[in-house]
Amino acid sequence: MESKNLKQAGLKATLPRLRILQLLENSKQRHLSAEDVYKALLEIGEDVGLATVYRVLTQFETAGLVIRHHFENGLSVFELNKGHHHDHLLCVKCGQIVEFIDDTIEKRQHSIAKKHGFEITDHCLYMYGICPKCQKKNS
Amino acid sequence: MESKNLKQAGLKATLPRLRILQLLENSKQRHLSAEDVYKALLEIGEDVGLATVYRVLTQFETAGLVIRHHFENGLSVFELNKGHHHDHLLCVKCGQIVEFIDDTIEKRQHSIAKKHGFEITDHCLYMYGICPKCQKKNS
DNA sequence: CAAAAATATGCAAAAAATTCTCATTTTACT
DNA sequence: AGTAAAATGAGAATTTTTTGCATATTTTTG
């Protein structure tokens, strides 16, 4: 039950929060903007305010339920935090996103942070490019 | 002379552009938002419009003169492109930014992109944390 | 399980960041 | 210097996100 996740996060299990959480869990795209979430909820007939979506997503972020990203265009997109940190490889043409994790990179990052005496709270690696499909289209 | 850089980039050497370029070259902080640039110019008595600053920075980005970043807060900050790609280690308390480059990481990134068949156009790695100074302050 | 207390919601208004419009000015080229 | 092309500044407009507040929903507790 999703309401348990909310409770554990110290948040009341309200209808809008449950809906948003479910959407993030079930949506085909894992990376959604507040606007995306809002529209998707309207489409399935759920009547939530956009302000609530923003508020809830920020609360989810604070609670560690979701992760906020700022991709190239700068707007906030959110993905469910499944607990496994990963990096992102994004197609600038079609928007496809590949998630990956590389141990060598993670270790190097650690040692770089250590060398500079930083206590790391967060880190992200984004690679932008053109995916195989889009390469074919354009040639 | 900076006007040469502008000409080479296919941009007219106008006063606002020269001022902005100079500022980016001489500013103590290498990472500035449009607002920062605007205020800094006002302070030294240069009368430019904020819209111009935004326009010019975007043109500089397109021309490859500057690089745009979206750090944690999501707003656009710009740094002069000196031609040497590097990654960033940022203190979330005081805003200090350490630039670094790690060959191992770069190589791994390449091979990951290759594995997925992507043609990479751009990539960035941000690490957020608390710098040594701020760690001492808070303890 | 009803009533009170605590919190969340929706809406509209406000901020904040960025872009656009357009009349005027500046630059580049004879 | 004179003209065409391009850039600027000021403010309006957009876009994204946040806030204030009256109402509604949840949780607590008696």
Image (cartoon, coloured by chain):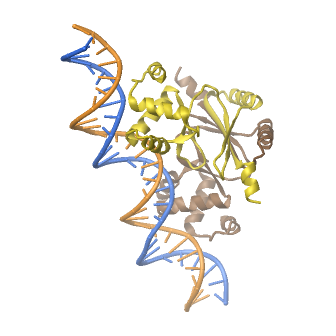
Chain colours: A yellow, B brown, C blue, D orange
Residue in the image at 71% along x and 49% along y:
A129
Q: Position of residue B135 (x, y in %)?
A: 57, 24
Screen quadrant of the N terminus of chain B: bottom right
Q: Is residue D27 left or right of residue D8?
A: left
Q: Quadrant of residue C23?
A: bottom left
Q: Is residue B64 left or right of residue B32?
A: right
Q: Quadrant of residue B3?
A: bottom right
Question: Between A113 and A59, which is closer to the camera in this rendering?
Answer: A59
Q: Position of residue C19 (x, y in %)?
A: 50, 60
Question: Between B119 and A120, which is closer to the camera in this rendering?
Answer: B119
Q: Is residue A67 visible?
A: no
Q: Is residue B69 visible?
A: yes
Residue in the image at 64% along x and 60% along y:
B62
Q: Position of residue B23 (x, y in %)?
A: 58, 56
Q: Is residue A72 left or right of residue C9?
A: right
Residue in the image at 37% along x and 39% along y:
A47
Q: Quadrant of residue A78?
A: top right
Q: Is residue A14 left or right of residue B2?
A: left
Q: Position of residue B82 (x, y in %)?
A: 71, 52
Q: How many marks?
A: 0
Q: Is residue A68 above or below residue D29?
A: below
Residue in the image at 55% along x and 49% along y:
B76
